[in-house]
Image (cartoon, rainbow, N blue to C red):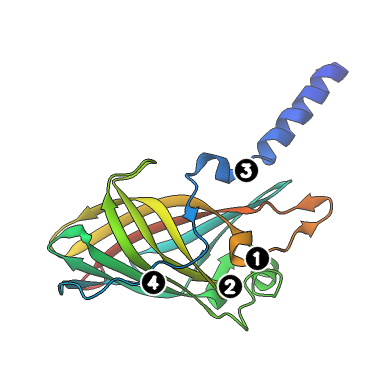
Amino acid sequence: MKYSSLTVVSLVLLSLSVSCANPADNAPKAVISGTATPAIGARASGTRLVITPSNSRIDFIGSKVTGSESGWFKQFSGLVELVAENPVQSQVSIEIDMNSVATKSQGLDEHLKTADFFEVARYPKATFVSTSIKSGSEAMGTHTVTGNLELHGVQKAITFPATINVTADAVSVDSEFAINRKDFGIVYAGKTNDLIRDEVVLKLTIKAGSAGL
C-alpha cells in the first residue's frame, strides 16, 4: 500500500500529538497556597481507621515532551479519624516513605530518589494532614479537602476534590488532581530536547478500615 507524503506527515503528527499529551490537562488542579493552614483544635474522638498499602494506593503520573511515566509508593501509613460517620467532622493523615517510590524502570526509581527530584536522603518522608473537609466540590467529587502537604521539605496548604464514602467502620476516598512540582522546590528541567512538565497528577485510592480492610 502506498501513502502520499502528506498522509505520512499527518500520521507522524498524529502520533506525536498522542505521545506528547499532558495527563494533567484532564485532571482538576489543586489549589496551593504559600503557607500551611492553622492546625485544627481539639475535636470529638472518633473511630480510628487504618490506611496501609494493603488497602490503599498512592499513584502519580509525570510527563515529558515525549511521553509520560506512571509511578507509586510502596510504603506509607495513615489514619482516618472518623467522627459520627461524617467526613466533615473527620480528619485524615498520611505519611509516605519517599524511598519506596517505584515505577516500571529501576533506573528511573533511583533517579527520582536523587537531588534532581525527591532527594530522599535529605527528605525521607512526605506528609499530609487535613485541616478541613467540606461537602460539595466545584470539580468532580463529593467533598473538598484542604490540608497541609509537606513534600521535599516544603510545607504548603493544598485543596483538592475527593469522592468520599463512609460506613460505620470503613471509609473510602478517591481523588485525582494535579499539582505543580515547582511549588515544592522540585525544579529539575530534564534534557534540553526532552523537557519535563511542571504538572504532576496525584491519584489517591484509599479504603481504610478498623482492621486494615
Kind of residue sitting beneath label 4: Ile
Of marks 4 and 2, the one in the foreground: 2
At x 38%, y 57%, the residue is 205
Q: Nearer the viewer, mark 3 or mark 1?
A: 1
> How far apart are labels 4 and 2 at the CA level?
15 Å
Closer to the eye: label 3 or 2: 2
Residue found at x 47% / y 52%: 31
Residue for badge 2: 152
Q: Nearer the viewer, mark 4 or mark 1?
A: 1
Q: CB under 8 Å between callouts 2 and 1?
A: yes
Q: Quadrant of residue 191?
A: bottom right
Q: Position of residue 13 (x, y in %)?
A: 76, 29
Kindly indicate whether the residue at mark 1 contacts the one at mark 3 (C-beta within 8 angstroms): no
Quadrant position of the N terminus in the picture: top right
Q: Which residue is mark 4?
A: 94
| As drawn, 173 above or below 10 | below
- Identify the mark nearer the N-term, 4 or 1: 4
Residue at position x 19%, y 72% from top?
43
The kind of residue on which mark 2 rests is His
Q: Answer with mark 3 or mark 2, whichever residue precedes in sequence.
A: 3
